[in-house]
Amino acid sequence: MQHRTIFFVSDQTGVTAETLGHSLLTQFDGVEFRQVTLPFISTAQKAEEAVRRIDATFESEGVRPIIFSTLVQEEMREILKRAKGLFLDFFAVFLDPLEQELGVKPSRAPGRAHGMMDLNSYTLRIDATNFALANDDGAITRDYDRADLILIGVSRSGKTPTCLYMALQYAVFAANYPLTDEDFERNALPPELLKHKHKLYGLTINPERLQQIRAERRPNSRYAAADQVEFEVRAAEALFRRYSVPYIDTTSRSIEEIASQILDETGVERRLRP
Amino acid sequence: MQHRTIFFVSDQTGVTAETLGHSLLTQFDGVEFRQVTLPFISTAQKAEEAVRRIDATFESEGVRPIIFSTLVQEEMREILKRAKGLFLDFFAVFLDPLEQELGVKPSRAPGRAHGMMDLNSYTLRIDATNFALANDDGAITRDYDRADLILIGVSRSGKTPTCLYMALQYAVFAANYPLTDEDFERNALPPELLKHKHKLYGLTINPERLQQIRAERRPNSRYAAADQVEFEVRAAEALFRRYSVPYIDTTSRSIEEIASQILDETGVERRLRP
């Protein structure tokens, strides 16, 4: 197995470098990557320090580290390029064609993507996160009028992480409501949900997988019993179909996939992007 | 003001394309960008549909849209290249140098970065998120032994969103504990925190900003009164200094900046990257 050390170098948080690097690295099987983030490289001194660290890695491992850089400032880039590694420069490649196309000079100010450039955006994300928390798990303090989306599904089908992700990533206001035996016995969605039927989106999950998740949480409980889990999943899906609520199977999907699919299908607008 | 429509085109969620595009676009002032994500472009038919949509935008706006593509499959890329827009191809640029460096052929399988390639990673993120929720706001069900970090600070200093972000993004287990009058009157951190002193990290915030945030939440309350807010912030900072707890001012920092700074300073390892 080949081993390689990866450095994500940024004059700001490093989130962009990590995301771009990660999606490239997942294309290469059979290599084990050790990943190191070097954020806030915003002075020549810090840049020199980063070079020393990269060079030391090269000396000890005998193979060039790979450097994913989102450095914007020319000075820092020039320093980092001297490091004994493969230097992949995200901004160098794309800034020029964009400058030509837009006819506008790039600011070359560091840290704009994930910095606090815009108090309004920041407040939106926090508000959306607080909204997701306050409207989690069918909480009493429901505020469905303000919701962009209301996710419904049985306990542990993925509602909460999806709502939090959509809030933090896109400032989408997503509430969630757990379907329980009470709903299944009535074989009806509660009136407070039906008032907002166009906002509803269902999550379902493979019963075996759900049983496993619940058993880790509460072993040997009715909550985690095979027949109970099977019953809940079937009953939830029957309700989705009865009310024509669109739904998605979360079993083998990541949070990003679930969120992206729901937003794409419903047309709910992302208020911001990462 | 120049207007331009941006398309993020992906055979998977679109998260990488959004991240790349967003960090480049923030470099150009004086342009208003309308942003559209076209995820799951995984068939020729969907690719043709995307081209039609981009072309229609060109016709109606009279100016070329900009396309950030993370398409991996050759066939879809070739189709999208025909669209009447500036096509910026993320994978085309970086896969070749990486292939040469690693001596490994890229898989060109779509959707690896934010897909469910790895059940273990997925479970870690969910576990970290559940941990953050269960250990939020000094909840009774504390489980500080499992925590990587315990964030402390006054109410609304940014603890909860930071913990949730670190969980979802990096699978870092972060608990949080709100400092209150009780702690300030004792002028001491509670013993359950001191047991884990090396895991503590403080958040502070500008009193005027905090007052504003609290006033939106509970107008005309003691909670939002200038002298109370001022007192709490000063007392919290005094406790941080007294116990040599490192701390960060969150006032003009984004969640990404706060998280990145804390992880960089403490050396807490990211269990995964986005």
Image (spheres, coloured by chain):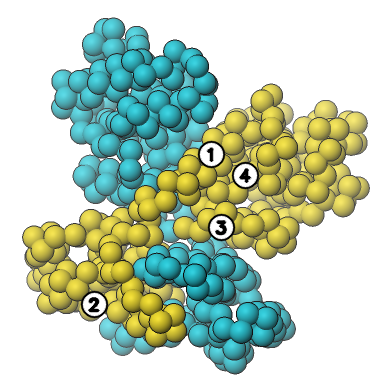
Chain colours: A cyan, B yellow
What's the amino acid at mark 4?
Phe
| Chain holding disc 3 | B
Q: Which residue is mark 4?
A: B173
The answer to whether any part of residue A168 appears in the image is no
Nearer the observer, A155 or B108:
B108
Residue A72 x/y as whole percent: 52, 80
Image quadrant in which you'd find residue B63 = bottom left
Q: Earlier in the sequence, mark 4 or mark 1?
A: 1
Check residue B127 in the rendering and tell me which mark sits there, or answer none: 1
| Chain holding disc 4 | B
Determine the CA span between mark 4 and mark 1: 8 Å
* Crowding near the residue tagged with mark 4, few <14, some 14–19, many ≥20 C-alpha atoms within 10 Å: many
Determine the CA span between mark 4 and mark 3: 16 Å
Check residue B256 in the rendering and tell me which mark sits there, or answer none: 3
Q: Which residue is mark 2?
A: B87
Task: Please name the residue shown 50% across and 76% down the image.
Answer: A68
What's the amino acid at mark 1?
Asp
Residue B141 x/y as whole percent: 66, 25
What's the amino acid at mark 3?
Glu
